[in-house]
Image (cartoon, grey):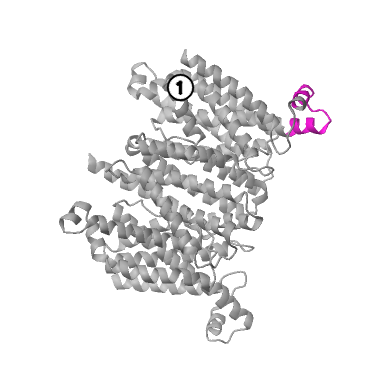
Amino acid sequence: MKKKIFFLFIVVLLVLASVSSLRYGASDNSWREIYHALLQLGGNNQTQQLIYYLRLPRTIASLFIGAAFAVSGALMQGITHNPLADSGLLGINAGAGLGLALVFAFTNPTPAMTMFASFIGAAIALAIIYIASSRIIFVRSSIHMVLLGAAIGSFFTALSQSIRLLFNLNQEITFWFVGGSANVTWPQIQIAVPVMTLGIMGAWLLRNQITLLSIGDEAAISLGKNPQRIRQLSMFCVLLLAGTAVSLVGAISFLGLIIPHIVRFFVGHDYRWVIPATVLFGAFFFVVADVLSRLVAPPLETPVGVIVTLIGVPLLLLQIRKGNV
Amino acid sequence: MKKRVWALLSLLLIIGITLSLSVGTISLSVTEILAVLTGDGTPAQQLLVFHFRFPRTLIAIFAGAGLAISGYLFQTVTHNDLAEPGILSINAGAGLTVLLYLGFFTNHSSNNLLPLIACSGSFFAAFLVYFCGKQGENVAMNRLLLSGVAVNAGISALTLISTVNVSQDSYRFVTAWLSGTIWGTTWQHIMMILPILFCLIPFILWQGKSLEVMALGDKQAIGLGLSLKKKQLFFLFSAIVLAAVSVALIGNISFLGLIAPHLAKNLIHQRNNLTLLMSAFFGAILLLYSDIVGRVILSNGEMAAGIIVSIVGAPYFIFRLLKTNQGAFNKAK
């Protein structure tokens, strides 16, 4: 019963947040204008153009990006027994950033190419984490895992910074490094949304197995499942989700860390509920952060990644202080 | 054997200084540098060497040494090989207050208050890391490192957000600072860092015996009659101050405080004042060469020294992480 109320509540909030995301920004529009613009997509008047070409793709992207980061965090936390798993903290975002910097350095990329490049980068970082996670010491200590991730992250960041400087890329990807969804366009969405949907569906299909894994490998084995296989499939979903999201919006940390923790507080530890709740709550959270990023210091945009971090860090510090991690 | 190491280090330092004076957008040959040093160069060369390159070289040396000593102190006091000012967010704290100060209160980057401002930020960050990391009486080092990573992320975000309201110039300065460009390159900047180094380092060396005892372990140190708490406080205080003033002038450079002491400890197995001094030497040399490499790689501008240090330092950090942990785990078993 409590779960149903939570889901209902979150859906209502999500709709409200999405609509506000269409309305508020550097130029303020009335509800009536938004309504008409939505009825007549791609119309000729200025507001309609604004909504169609800037706000709508941005809102759609934010919804999916928030869901993608949150679900990838939940998946990683489930399969590694690591309460600190997050694509930002473990250096996967930085890996994707390196791929992106490389593709911008040598080509004039299409949206599909940038996405593929950040996949490859994320895959490399994820492979390192995957190899490390089989070492006994990392299985035992989630803190060591985060330290490893931090080191991988700063290594990849340093490499991509040097590529930016060597090839003079500042203009092209600065927006990306601070994290922002302002530049999302329809062609990007056409590629990214199907991929992220695929990742979320994968997570949904894996939900029961992940619950088993979070109880322990023995539970999975005794039911005839192969833990290693489940991990690999989940990692692939993480790759689809985090890689795509990073290629769209840049390095957003802490979203994947905090959302699953908040969600578990409401729906418990069963991934049958955790996965859908994370999708909805992640999407809601990121859309709100994105709206905030426009409203903090208008007409300038505060990088949304910064806002998410500023919300996430105190929560993490609180957890550390309480000794939960 | 040891003498040879010291000779080699001095040689490296001298070569580094020469390279640092000669390499850049306008490069000078060794004979030209000698001419300048004896006062025979052209006015342009004189200006270039004395006004730009020489102070920059000195800053790289002093700040590198400062960070290395800071790292050495942190590692000895906390008995953790992975401790260093960068990961404990001492650097980030200094950076934030320096940026706020330069961005909002004054435009004079050669202000005498700068070291003090940097220290205030560092102490704040250190306190936050300590407060979040400790669990009652029990201070687990790895938890401190984790809370360092978190505080680091938070402070970097605050730094970025505070640049939204500053001018274009300050923004450029912030991004350069964050990637670790040596920016404090005037004689005034040297005068800011030098007195602090000259006061603190002899004092630390004078207390070297107690540091040596501490390296044996907390229980042994107390058993040998050391007032542990007091000494710990002194060394941590010095470590934070050294890191803060260095970082205030050279930007956010991580991993240097990790690598330099490790190199020294590998060469000298007893932990004494010589190890400390050798760490300082390594720190100075590493930063000096990173700065030079940064200038050489990019012909049209420069690559921040911090980036170069990270590219070398991060893999080393990973290596240590894998190695020390495996050892600790085997011991625990």
In the displayed structure image, the side of residue B303 where residue B142 appears, left or right: left
Q: Is residue A50 magenta?
A: yes
Query: Could you tell me if residue B262 is visible in this image?
Result: no
- Say which residue appears at 45% left-offset and 36% top-offset: A315
- The three-letter amino acid code for the residue at tag 1 is Phe
Quick one: B107 or B217, which is closer to the camera? B107
Residue density around tag 1, few if under 14, some if 14–19, many if 20 or more, within 10 Å: some
Q: Give the mark count.
A: 1
Q: Residue furthest right?
A: A44
Residue B197: where, in percent of width, then height? Answer: 40, 69
**Residue to which mark 1 is pinned:** A266
Q: Mark 1, chain letter?
A: A
- On screen, residue B329 above or below A41: below
Quadrant assignment for the C terminus of chain A = top left
Residue B150: where, in percent of width, then height? Answer: 44, 43
Q: Main secondary structure of the magenta part?
A: helix
Tell me where residue B258 sits by quadrant: bottom left
Query: Could you tell me if residue A221 is visible in this image?
Result: yes
Residue A26: where, in percent of width, then height? Answer: 71, 39
Residue B244: where, in percent of width, then height? Answer: 44, 59
Q: Is residue B94 magenta?
A: no
Tell me where residue A168 sits by quadrant: bottom right
In the displayed structure image, the side of residue A290 where residue A76 appears, left or right: left
- On screen, residue A215 above or below B287: above
Quick one: A42 or B307, which is closer to the camera? A42
Find the magenta span and give its range: A34-53
Q: Look at the numbered disc 1 and give the secondary structure of its residue.
A: helix
- Say which residue appears at 30% left-offset and 73% top-offset: B3
